[in-house]
Amino acid sequence: MPEHRGGAGQPPLRLLVATNLVTLLCRTVARYGSEIDVLTPDGAIMRVNLRRKVDDVVCGDMVSVDIGERTVLARGERRNQLARRDGFERRRTIAANIDRVWVVVAPRPEIPHLLIDRFLVGILNLPAQAGLIINKCDLIDADNGPALEAKLATYGHLRIPVLRISAHSGSGTKELSETAAGGSNILVGQSGVGKSSLIQAMLPGEDLRVGEIGQTGEGRHTTTTARWYPADHQGAWIDSPGVRDFTPEITTFDELVRGFPDLGEISDGCRFRNCTHRSEPGCAVRQAVLREMLPEGRLDAWLELLKNVNTH
Ligand SMILES: Nc1nc2c(ncn2[C@@H]2O[C@H](COP(=O)(O)OP(=O)(O)OP(=O)(O)O)[C@@H](O)[C@H]2O)c(=O)[nH]1
Ligand SMILES: [Mg+2]
Ligand SMILES: [Zn+2]
């Protein structure tokens, strides 16, 4: 390549700076206010600034970064995004570009009513693959075991992986790494169920903060921001802060249907198309519950979430 020199009276350095805008396509690892940590293509973590015109950036987003200025120039298009409504009806985007969402539960803390069903509706509408992890299997005993198994049976007929794991003993972690291989996997759930502990078990080279559990069995919200951890074969684990509840961002009947594939299959037998399974005559879904072919909990969850969508 011919060497460029500055023209008469022009300092060569200026030309060098002007042509030397180095931009790199990076993965957003985590967001901290108006700054983000990015993963550069050669595997380094770098803290860079967001500007107001490119402000909508979350964990998992691809961004082009001006390395000299350490600022984000643009954000890549998102494949999908996991968002929830907060207590003030504001949208909170948790992470983007997700292949699988694992809902993590444990014998302690207790699983809140409908939390799993609500997550499933959100996940299936991303769309992304869904999975259920029962962590802390080392704590299952004759006291808490039957209730937990009954709860899990509610989801046994959905064609999603249900994995029993102990981040502490390592039992079940091999199956998790096989099922999760090659994609981006986010762990979601209540505080204290062991999301960070599981990622630590999957990635021993990383150093994640793990929290204590209070007397009540509740976590202490140790993880405060979602974080992307690269894994083998282009895969990734995403840790996320614990939530008390999850409200999926759905408004239409079709979205609700997508969130309940098990009811959808049965509802082909309902007398009315678009049957809401509330009280219509000839409802195959309510029949299936009576015949114990569909767990009652799934119909309860459907009816609860139906209140939030427009059925006209
Ligand atoms: N007995 C047992 N305890 C576990 C297991 N996994 C995690 N824990 C404990 O559960 C507590 C909470 O673990 P974390 O990994 O911080 O939980 P988290 O889901 O990341 O919580 P937040 O970051 O607050 O959302 C810690 O005291 C862990 O040691 C497990 O498999 N068995
Ligand atoms: Mg955590
Ligand atoms: Zn019906």
Image (cartoon, helix red, strand yellow):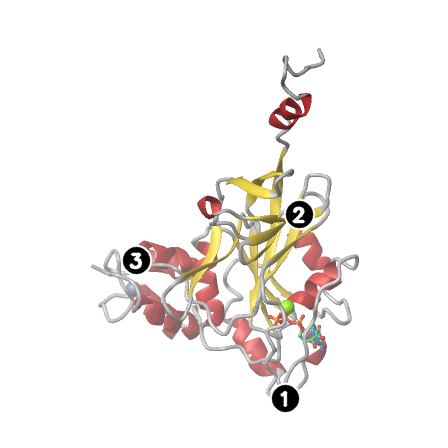
Coordinates of residue 33 in the picture (x, y in percent): 54, 58
Residue denoted by label 3:
253
Residue denoted by label 1:
215
Placement of 301 over or under 253, stated as above or below = below
Label pair 1/3, CB-CB below 8 angstroms = no
Q: Residue at x 68, y 58 (%)?
A: 176
Residue denoted by label 2:
235
The residue mark sitting in front, 1 or 3, is 1
Q: Amino acid at mark 1?
A: Gln
**Nearer-N-terminus badge (2/1):** 1
Q: Residue furthest left?
A: 312
**SS of the residue under disc 3:** helix
Coordinates of residue 264 in the picture (x, y in percent): 37, 57
Residue closest to the eye, 227 or 70: 70
The residue mark sitting in front, 3 or 2, is 2
| Label 3 Cα crowd, 10 Å radius (few <14 / some 14-19 / many 20+) | some
**Which quarter of the figure has residue 164?**
bottom right
Q: Amino acid at mark 2?
A: Gly
Q: Amino acid at mark 3?
A: Phe
**SS of the residue under disc 2:** loop
Q: Residue at x 68, y 75 (%)?
A: 211
Residue closest to the eye, 182 or 264: 182
Quadrant location, the N terminus? top right
